[in-house]
Image: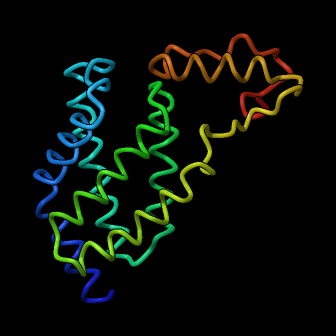
Amino acid sequence: MHFLNQQVSEALNTRRPALAERMVARELVRHPELEQRYGVAGRDRCLEDAGYHLAYLAQAIAADSVALFVDYVGWAKVTLAKRDIPARDLGGLLGIMKESLQQELPPEFSRLAGHFLDHVLQRLPQLADDVPSFIVEGAPLAPLARAYLQALLRGPAGHCRARSLPSSVSVHAV
């Protein structure tokens, strides 16, 4: 690990709560409609997400791995999309993160963090909006596999029974 990377990572981790607060405040000043759309709970979630974004950026910088941060942002994009939060909101917050770090960190620190953020902002439109399913469409047991998955996601595994399977088909085959 490079010494500068370690310093930037430590600075981000140490200042994370204050940086996240400033980022969200800037975002809401710039886009007041977001607070109207998402409410106070949305603001709290945005603050929490900003903290996660900073934590993952700090770890990616410590590991000197832009790819690590790109992977995280890809995951965040899918996760937020599932909550009906568009990628433009994520991109907006990441852009504000870059601005905030330029104002809050020493120039050499913000340049390094900015490099990671520039890379991820460039890649954001190409990152997937959803995770591909392993259930193959058109497969004979695809409807049953989807129903089984939904049952698992709804509650404890004890509530999910494989009794709807024909006796000739194992759960593994689904």
Q: In this view, does 39 lie to the left or right of 138?
A: left
Which quadrant of the view contains residue 27?
Answer: top left
The N terminus is located in which quarter?
A: bottom left
Image coordinates for residue 145, horizontal then vertical, percent: 72, 23
Q: Which residue is drawn at 23% across and 34% down?
A: 28
**Quarter placement of the C terminus:** top right
Horizontal side of 79 relative to 112 (left or right) equals right
Residue 83, image x, y percentages: 44, 26
- Up the image or down, 61 lies above or below 125; here it is below
Place residue 146 in its image quadrant: top right
Counting every numbered tag in the picture gives: 0
* Residue at x 21%, y 43% (from the top left corner): 26
Q: Residue 50: x percent and y percent?
A: 27, 46
Front in this rendered view, residue 141 or 61? 61
Q: Residue at the spot x=24%, y=19% of the render?
A: 39
Question: How is this picture coloured?
Answer: rainbow
Q: Which residue lies furthest to the top in this view?
A: 164
What's the residue at 61%, 37% (across, down)? 130
Q: In this view, does 108 lie above or below 48?
A: below
Q: Which of 3 and 159 is in front in this view?
A: 3
Image location (x, y in percent) of residue 153: 52, 22
Compare residues 165 and 75 and report the one nearer the observer.
Answer: 75
